[in-house]
Amino acid sequence: MDKEEQQKTLEEDYNNPEDKKTDENFVKADLDSDQKKEEEKVITPEEKIKELEDKLARTFAEMENQRRRFQKEKEDAFEYGGTSFAKEALNLIDNLERSKQVLENDEKLKNTEALNKTLDHLNIINKDLISIFNKNNIKSIDCLNKKLDPNLHQAMMEIEDDQKEPGTIIQEIQKGFTIKDRLLRPSLVGVSKKSEDKNKESSKSQENKENK
């Protein structure tokens, strides 16, 4: 087939009424589809208002949450902002206590008037410090004869004592403190445990019961 015949065939196909009708149907179908999509996208005024109300409500809720977080952070900063300073200040109490122990254990100073006066002054200073701490909601932890509480105490040693229930605090090595409702530092303590003899007796008693 030469070029002229090919061109003639293409023109005949293009001018074919059936082909034109098919093309028109495709175009119409596309237009109908686009129109349908546009109709589906149409939002009524009521729906638009509801959508805006939802967005506004979410915005207000988020703003309220941020306000509460800011208020909480502000209160925490006010209540606990001095935590680092308080921890450092506790060293004063520790040093006073150590100084008292050194003086009390000095054989040359025992039962002397100078020692008694010095200890009295140290006790006054210690009392004043504790009073200042209490006014700022920094309070010492009462731990002696209490059960060991990991939230407040840290066991440093076990001491044999058959008169106390195991796990009872019988020695305070370093005083612990809280600030408001938070732990500033734990009490360092010694807790009771049963003596070796009592443990052996308990084991034998248990074995006898099992054998019976």
Image (cartoon, helix red, strand yellow):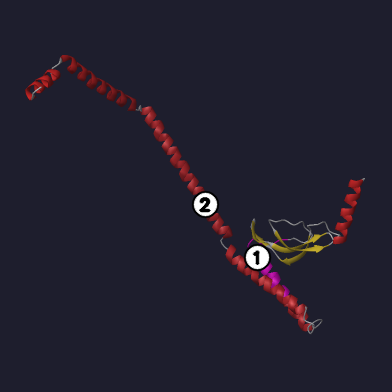
**Badge number at residue 17:** none
Image quadrant holding the C terminus, namely top right
Task: Report the span colored magenta.
Answer: 122-141
Determine the residue positioned at 43% across, 41% down: 59
Q: Which residue is mark 1?
A: 133
Residue 71, label in figure: 2
Residue 81: x %, y % from top left: 56, 61
The extreme right residue here reads: 212
Q: Establish if 17 lies above or below 184.
A: above
| Secondary element type, mark 2 | helix
Q: Residue furthest left?
A: 4
Q: Nearer the viewer, residue 6 or 17?
A: 6
Which residue lies most toward the bottom here?
108
Is 108 above or below relative to 87?
Answer: below
Q: Inspect the image, locate mark 1, and give the three-letter code of the amino acid beneath it.
A: Phe
**Residue that protrudes farthest toward the top in the picture:** 18
**Is residue 94 or residue 122 the one in the foreground?**
94
Q: Main secondary structure of the magenta part?
A: helix
Among the two numbered marks 1 and 2 on one chain, the one whose residue lies closer to the N terminus = 2
- Give SS at disc 1: helix
Instruction: Between residue 1 and residue 111, name the one nearer to us.
Output: 1
